Image (tube, rainbow, N blue to C red):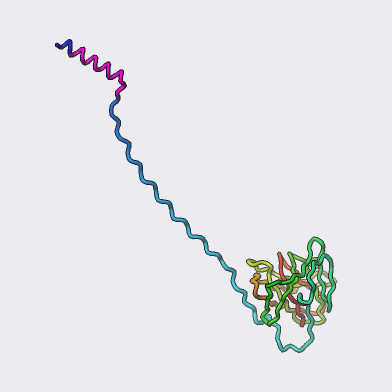
Amino acid sequence: MKKILVVFIALMAILCVACGSKPAEKPAAPAAPAAAPAPAAPAAAAVEAPAFVQDPAAIPASDYSGDEKFLSANDLKTWTLMDRKDLDDGFYITANAEKNVVIQAQGSEVLTAADGQVFDKRISLGGSGNADFRSVYFTADKPGKAYIYLMSSSKTEARTLLVSQKTEDGIVPVGQVIAPIYDRKSVAIGVVDIPDAGEYYVASKKSGIYVYEILLR
């Protein structure tokens, strides 16, 4: 009997090996839930440039009765200047083929200055200038003031217009006027003291500026 039992156990062992039976495996642990996506950061609000505020001290007096002369873009024809252009009353514009000056129509964007003047044209100084190019000259007959009507050509960046005197000894800085951002509504007025009679010019320190008028009193 014992022999039969031993033989039976041996046969069962052989069958298990032949069938490749393995011990039962533990079930896999459930997968962890996916993390919730992080909320998107809110979009940055657009930053609007500050509105232009005219300095009242720079507005020419409406009841002035003394001598004056002026250059207005409204009186010029639209064209691209690539050489010096002489105008009336001692005004002239410098330009060359590479650094020209453009007299442009405002189109539908007719702009108004604080003194009520309306402009439908502008003198476009398309970049920095100096005594030889991209500059507007005027001749002062006496000490006084130069009122300059202007705006930056940029809608986001105010720019600086330099006023200089051309003398026998060289170029002498006289002052500067800030050209506010172009808001399609206004024309700013800046004023610079003119120390004595002589030849002066205005030019952008950096990048484009629109000049609408220069008034000498």
- Quadrant of the frame with the N terminus: top left
* Residue 14, image x, y percentages: 27, 16
* Above or below for 5 versus 111: above
Viewer-nearest residue: 4 or 206:
4
Residue 59 lies left or right of residue 81; in this view the side is left
Q: Which residues lie in the magenta part? A: 5-21
Residue at the limit of the structure toward the front, as seen here: 108
**Residue 69 image point, x, y percent:** 79, 81
Residue 12 versus residue 139 in the image, above or below: above
- Identify the residue shown where x is 46% and y is 56%: 40
How would you classify the magenta stretch by its main secondary structure? helix
Along the line of sight, the residue nearer the viewer: 108 or 29: 108
Using the rendered view, name the quadrant where residue 169 is placed.
bottom right
Q: Position of residue 92 (x, y in %)?
A: 82, 73
Image location of residue 12, percent across then percent down: 24, 17
Residue 15 colored in magenta in the image: yes
- The number of numbered badges drawn on the structure is 0
Instruction: State the residue in front, 164 or 78.
Output: 78
Q: Is residue 133 visible?
A: yes
Q: Is residue 15 positioned above or below 97 on the image? A: above
Q: Is residue 178 visible?
A: no
Query: Which residue is depicted at the point 24% across and 14% down?
Result: 11
Given residues 74 and 124, the one toward you in this image is: 74
Q: Is residue 154 magenta?
A: no
Q: Quadrant of residue 191?
A: bottom right
Q: Is residue 120 above or below residue 206?
A: below
Q: Quadrant of the C terminus?
A: bottom right
